[in-house]
Amino acid sequence: MKNLFKLFSIIIIIIASNSYSLAAEKVEYLKTDWSFKGLFGKFDRSSLQRGYQVYTEVCASCHSMKYLSYRNLAEPGGPEFSEAQAKAIAASFEVTDGPNSDGEMFTRPGKLSDKFVMPYENVKAAQAANGGAYPPDMSVLVKARGGGVDYIYSLLQGYEEAPSNVSLDDGVYYNKYMYGNKIRMAAPLTDGLVEYGDGTNASVEQMSKDVTTFLMWSAEPHLEARHQMGFKAIVYLIILTVLVYFSMKKIWSRVESEV
Amino acid sequence: MSDHDYRPKSKVGQWFNDRLPLLTLANHLTDYPTPKNLNYWWTFGGILTFCLITQIVTGLTLAMHYIAHADMAFESVEHIMRDVNYGWLIRYIHANGASMFFLAVYIHIFRSLFYGSYKSPREIIWILGIIIYLLMMAAAFMGYVLPWGQMSFWGATVITNLFSAIPLVGEGIVTWLWGGYSVDNPTLTRFFTLHYLIPFLILGLVVLHIWALHVPGNNNPVGIDIKKPSKDTVPFHPYIVIKDGFALLMFMIVFAFFVFYAPNILGHADNYIEANPMVTPAHIVPEWYLLPFYAILRSVPDKLLGVVAMLSAILILAVLPWLDTSKIRSAVFRPLYRQFYWILVADVLILGYVGAMPAEGLYLLIARVATAYYFLHFLVILPVLGFKEKTLPVPLSITEPVLGGSPNLAAARNKESKIE
């Protein structure tokens, strides 16, 4: 019994230390308290709604989010806009549909079932409009970067004057959290860039936090369901383990051997 | 085995059993005499069976929604994560299940190394195990390619390119494996097919593995042959069933923690970027469970010799029963081997660590030393140790101390409990 605990603690230590060493990048990212971390972590709804506003007013002019649909905005565990709000959001976008009975493509207002409208027709068009750099799709961006939410949050606030020993080409900016410190994206946020409906002060820090929360949700739309189910599953397993442990003790008491 | 003369009680049972002796098999499996001193390291066989079945069931479900096409694979995985009911749960169980499977198999293998379970008369069980392990690595590697992320693509490119090291026909073989001139759609579809096939091959081999186990019966921590059934054994059911069940539940708690609270910690962030043949990731690293062999591969400067070294590192295990010349099975009674055993464990962990690091400078040096030691352990230390080592006296039976036993037993028992 003691051995088993020893064994499992060794396993956990090895895995934990391993993952920490892999995650230990050179730079210290900015930290903030994310509501979605931890055993019962949930998204902050109003932060998600503000984050969507930042995304759609700022990021969406270059970054697509091709795996999301407008219906997701009204689904439980997300920003939870009302269905009417989500419909209005969808309808504010022009979607190309077709071909119709005449064989022509046509545009119509978006519906809940539509995917988020992309800012560019294709990757080449996106590159052409951005000096050769492709603004990555943001659907799973948080999971596609080593530092995760902390990295994105820091990057948005990491723009600085380049140190004198670094020379930058035209259209390249200095960011202390970017890999190699050179980034093709100009600082996207400035204080007061968006006007929040709920009166929250739109500082760069606030907008960074909101939009990063939104990106976390877009990458893991079922995070809340996962945390809730995880807690129940683990509690269930622990209770069952204890019961089985006592049954085992009882059964093995018939033979003169320890278990 | 004595249970072959089993006769079902009911007439119908007898009629059926005379034609297909499934009831005899069931009776054998429940009564199967198992050493009663098996410790928790022995529960990983059952845990591995659970892992295999979990992978097959979740894998079948994923295959219902996955699309094996270079243009659609990544998107179909996102579809599973977002729109399939509990798709996220199924996929995270499958992805983390692979890691859990390897975690359990490494414990299983190192348990066998410690207690000498690979020695006569269990060589065939061991060799079947090595084949299963090789197939597991193939299945895991191909499974990692299926989401068609950056690591999928570049991992597949690196590993398949290893075959180009073969003289003369190497390039031809690589083209044949790819089904083209680079990793592309034909590669993905055949990897999917093979990834689907291999688990069932493993399942068949597991049946043989267990069958071969049931001929001599389990080894045990004392490592001696025991009379079966006897005072030294307990019937498999309920004693071992409940104990395996208990250990499995503990294992499932760890498993659940990863699935629900850290589902991506064992994966690589780059695999959430869709495969792009034009952009090479900064570091191409395999999954953690392949890292020791990756380190061996990179520690040899020559490509062909590196591949040979990597394959030998695995295949050398198949001849282990003949490399280890010691007649004593359990490390409990082998004071020197015990120390070399732990050095080997450390060596493999170090190889795993440097495998994750860039192959340069100090890391490369460490990798080379550790690789050399790995082979030294199997090719020199083990054969020599069998002749040189002064082993401790081995008890005659597991229950010996209870029955009064020999004078040297107390010392041996004492040693054993210290090690566990």
Image (cartoon, grey):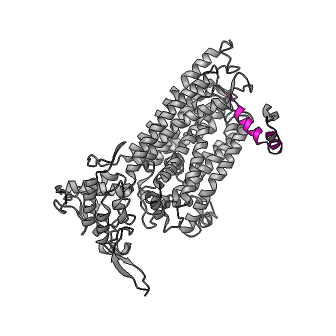
In the picture as drawn, the residue positioned furthest to the bottom comes out as A102
**B32 drawn magenta:** yes
Report the label total.
Answer: 0
Residue B90 in percent (x, y) is at 50, 52
**In the image, what residue occupies the spot 21% across and 61% down?**
A189
Residue B316 in percent (x, y) is at 64, 43
Looking at the image, residue A61 sits to the left or right of residue B412; the answer is left
**A19 drawn magenta:** no
* In front of the other: B75 or B302: B75
In the depicted structure, whether residue A74 falls above or below residue A224: below
* In front of the other: B40 or B50: B50
In the depicted structure, whether residue B399 falls above or below residue B266: above
Image quarter where the C terminus of chain A lies is top right
Q: Main secondary structure of the magenta part?
A: helix
Residue B126 location, quadrant: top right
* In front of the other: A165 or B261: B261
Residue B367 in percent (x, y) is at 49, 44
**In the image, what residue occupies the spot 34% across and 77% down?**
A108
Looking at the image, residue A163 sits to the left or right of residue A135; the answer is left
Residue A14 visible (yes or no): no
Give the magenta part as a residue range. Answer: B13-34
